[in-house]
Amino acid sequence: MPETPNNPGHSESEKNTASGSVGNVSFIMLLGAGLISIRRRYIKYYSGKFNVFCKRHNRWEIIYMLDNKITRRVFLGTTLCVVTAPLFATLLNEQNNLQKVLMDGQFFNAAELTLLTDVAEIMIPKTDTPGATDAHVIPVLDGLMLTWAGVKSKRQFRFIVAQINDLAKSTYGSVYNKLAFDDRFLLIEQLDKTAFANKKSVLSTHYRRLKEMVFHIYYTSEEANPDFILIPGGYRGSLSKQELDTIQARGYL
Amino acid sequence: MSTQQATQYDVIVVGSGITGGWAAKEFCEKGFNTLVIERGRHLDHPSPEYNDMKTPWQLENRGLATELYDEEGRYRMLKAKKKTLKTDSIQFFVDDKEAPYSYPDDRPFMWTRGHQLGGRSLTWGRQVLRWGAKDFEANAKDGHGVPWPISYDDLKPWYDHVETFIGVAGNKDGLDVLPDGVFQKPWQMSCAEQSIAKKMAEKYTDRHLIIGRSANLTEPSAEQRTLGRIACQARSYCARGCTLGAYFSSLSATLPAAKATGKLTIVTDAIASHVNYDEKTGKASGIMVVDANTLEQRSYRARVVFLCASALGTVQILLNSKSKTFPNGIANSSGVVGRYIMDHFTGAVGMGEVPGFDDQYSYGRRPIATYIPNFRHEKTGNVNFTRGYGYQTTAGARPSSGNTAKREGIGAKVKAEANQPKPWHFKAFMYGEMLPYYDNQASLHPTKKDKWGIPLLHIDAQVRDNERHMISQAAKDIKEILEVGGCTKIKIIETPKDQHITVGNRTHEMGGACMGADPKTSVLNKWAQAHDVDNLFVTDGACMSSCATQNPSLTYMAITARAADYATKLMNQGIL
Ligand SMILES: Cc1cc2nc3c(=O)[nH]c(=O)nc-3n(C[C@H](O)[C@H](O)[C@H](O)COP(=O)(O)OP(=O)(O)OC[C@H]3O[C@@H](n4cnc5c(N)ncnc54)[C@H](O)[C@@H]3O)c2cc1C
């Protein structure tokens, strides 16, 4: 089976100037203060250019191994062919409640990732169950742009970000990332309605493509499938809810 | 330049799929040195290529195959078949760009292949249904195709033999049209399926809804355990390969059994281009192969040759085996090689809700569907067609409302409403018997060759009026069955008469070297032995004289085991 590269080095990285301190923000958010000192050593070591960060990706993986939970979440699966999705350093803009992504991804730049992360979370928000951000939808999408997307999709996904920004500007006179949360929500909600009401427009096609991928990634994530049982052990075709819940809780028949 | 391999084998088996694995096992277990020639790559069992132990979030690209395939025009037919190319099992399917074949522009033929050790035994649906007596009598009775030279009784002991080894979970339903076999514990029907089955039984004497018969172990025998096979865990990830060996494949069962004898040699990456024919002896002397990687040509010698390269793969080899005696392909004095290409077809799909079970749920992923066997063997009433159809059906799992990825709706509310249990839903796909038409033909392309220098197979097959008439009636019948079964919100989809039906779509391609008593009108005798060349046997789907309505592989296996047994007797007697 052709294996997709775990960690593609690419020219996108050259333009990124994320520094160690940017990394710190992400670690604080992800791992809590207890691990920061360990991180710092590496951050210092890897501070500077993003391409160094990429190249040493596997070393990061080793560090993350210190925290199993994070490892599972950050590196989805352990085999080479799985898309790795490094979490992005983010900073909350408290004024408009927007998680600003501070570093470029493998395909999207930081501003694009910020917009996409927000749109995905509007589509599938955190409620009593995890949302798109919890399920790392956009980091995974960013990885898929290299391992899955063809030329057309790459163009479409980049273009839809620009189109959403254009829409924001023509509606509210500002780029998307500067809008208040309510405006952002209304904008995407309206876009969703229009896109399905008139499927012929280019905007609709691109938006529906994005939405489909966001949903696909979310609903195939571990976070969205807490009840998933890989090895059911058998089949039953007439169970009461109570019987089903008991089996589910046990995790096997 | 070709090289001749020094070893003379007793038997060469071309292909390591469902039938090749069986031939290898039977010959090896009877003490014959057997060489299996396989065009695909080597695979171990369990193989690192199996994806059955992966969760949805662990699959490469979250299950989506790279779009590069589309951009490069690869896997076109597989995409037409499956709509979306998936990473869970794409490695077990052939890219038609790499291994092309040909068809008329206005009549695409769908040839779904698996070029690897184990062939399509890795990805098959594992529905294993015996044919009944009427199925073998059909050609003789209505005059279509070539009469079968064997009856159900000839195959019965071989069905028993095969089922015992592969392991079939099935229910003894007591139906003449679908004889019972050697079964392990059947899979359960869901509450919805049971309800429909009960209502059908109250109304009909000829139409039955039964649980499918599945080559997934539910009560592994000692023999199966010795091979390292264990009971199916209801994951239904079978097409990804099964680490547990819980479903029957050549890799998990027949090839290991053959290997255990010490009599088996396997050569992979070796494409059989033709059967070598010895003009002096009038026998096949062996097989010529092209190395898939180096293009080097080599020939292998044996006393007996079994072609098990899948129906159309075998036809290609036969037609390409030209000699002075057989200028149109070996064993083709009748001119029938490549004729009577068949497949099952659908064209009527029925579905409906099954009310009354909103408090019932399912658990586990059952690896098999339910089934309504053919009830139209006899031309009753005013139907305007010959033969009949069955339905592959299911309501095995309670459906969910899904999500709004492809429809309007975002935010917390739609998220909360996603993936909620919906009413039970029953679906039925007609599987019709296509008549054996002489004009449905596979031939060698006059000019085009593949990268190994072998002429492309050109496949020209179509459904005709009889099949179209069947579709109309099947649509009416399934509507009535759903009503009788108590379904509501019934929806029937009938393929319009002017819409092309792609033959090959059901992946049950058959014919091309049919069995028959008369050497002038058929290629093989009742032992699947070539009329023209007595040490050449064809036991894959090419040997079929009609296609019935049941999934065919169990019948291929029974024919293979029976033919191998016959060949070994002739070998022991020194006749071959
Ligand atoms: C998705 C799917 C679902 C199916 N479901 C069912 C089902 O439920 N029930 C059922 O009965 N059938 C089913 N089938 C059909 C079933 O897989 C085939 O009928 C069966 O595999 C045929 O066995 P075979 O040995 O003839 O061919 P294969 O299993 O295809 O094996 C042929 C082998 O020959 C090799 N080969 C081909 N040409 C050459 C050559 N020139 N030289 C050397 N080697 C060669 C191939 O690489 C392959 O390994 C299904 C098929 C598919 C794809």
Image (cartoon, coloured by chain):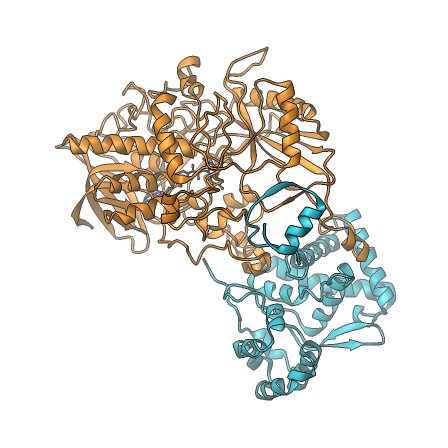
Query: Where residue B408 sits: x, y (%)?
Result: 78, 50
Q: Is residue A71 left or right of residue B254?
A: right
Q: Is residue A163 left or right of residue B546?
A: right
Residue A54 showing in the rendered view: yes
Chain letter, orange: B
In terms of image quarters, where does ligand 1 lie?
A: top left
Q: Residue at x 63, y 55 (%)?
A: A250
Query: Where residue B356 sits: x, y (%)?
Result: 74, 34
Chain letter, cyan: A
Q: Is residue A201 left or right of residue B66?
A: right
Q: Is residue A49 left or right of residue B51?
A: right
Residue B329 showing in the rendered view: no
Query: Where residue A95 sits: x, y (%)?
Result: 85, 76
State the quadrant of the N terminus of chain A. Answer: bottom left
Query: Where residue B70 sits: x, y (%)?
Result: 54, 52
As displayed, is residue B170 above or below residue B545?
below
Quadrant assignment, res A139? bottom right
